[in-house]
Image (spheres, rainbow, N blue to C red):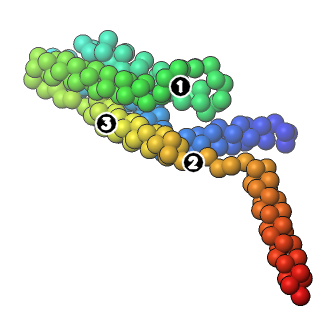
Amino acid sequence: MKSSTMRPAMKYAYLLRNFKKLSFEERVIFLSHAATILFCFFPWISIEPLYDDPYWNSAFSGAGALIGAFIFLTSLLVALFFVDKILETKRILISFPETYIFYATGIEQLIFLILSWSVLISVTRDFESSEIRFGIFACFLVQIAGLSATYLLAQNNQQKKAREFFHHPESPRGEKDLLSKKDEKLGGLFESDASNLIHHDQ
């Protein structure tokens, strides 16, 4: 029983440790796309027809369902990229900086959200009582936060590369020991010569 209860706890600690290994900016990007996935299921528009029951549409229903599906899938891909890093499965390998992906997906998400917003606005004009709801507002906010975090992450990476470029590599420990031994030998040679001169003068 103890081993069965410890395994989930160990897995949770393992995932939490790997999540904490991510930088603050990476956590914000990951959580922004995870939140976008969640808010796709929230109401994006509510409609109250005159002769029918009121209803609401999420990102997957109504006139903007196709755009909402693209928004969901894009954030899902980014979230899976971070899940791969946290689980350390290394199934997603890229040959270019990660910030390129985060920039591309963040800008794409904002464009899709603006398109979806315009579609929802056109839908509200067809009904006397309708309004844009919390879901799409939340997606806008978290994606702006994710794009801002991507900018900060790119700046930090550039500063790190600059520090590594201008940082002089330290000599290996063996070379330091060899130089110190040579200094000691040279110092001893001069000391012996000085003592011989003094003894000769006497």
Q: Left or right: where does residue 108 sit relative to residue 46?
A: right
* Residue pictured at 64% horizontal, 30% vertical: 87
Name the residue: 19% across, 17% down: 119
- Residue picked out by circle 3: 144
The disc placed on residue 168 is 2
Asked which quadrant contains residue 130, the reply is top left
Task: Decide which of tag 3 and tag 2 comes sooner along the chain.
Answer: 3
Percent coordinates x, y for residue 179 in the rendering: 76, 56
Q: Amino acid at mark 1?
A: Phe
Residue 65 falls in image quadrant: top left
Amino acid on which disc 3 is placed: Ile
- Screen quadrant of the C terminus: bottom right
Q: Describe residue 156's horizontal placement relative to residue 193 as left or right.
A: left
Q: Closer to the camera, 103 or 40? A: 103
Number of numbered discs overlaid on the protein picture: 3
- Measured Cα–Cα span from mark 3 to mark 2: 38 Å
Along the line of sight, which residue is nearer the eye, 148 or 40? Answer: 148
Label 2 vs label 1, nearer the camera: 2
- Crowding at dot 3, Cα within 10 Å, few <14 / some 14-19 / many 20+, comes out as some
Label 1: which residue? 81
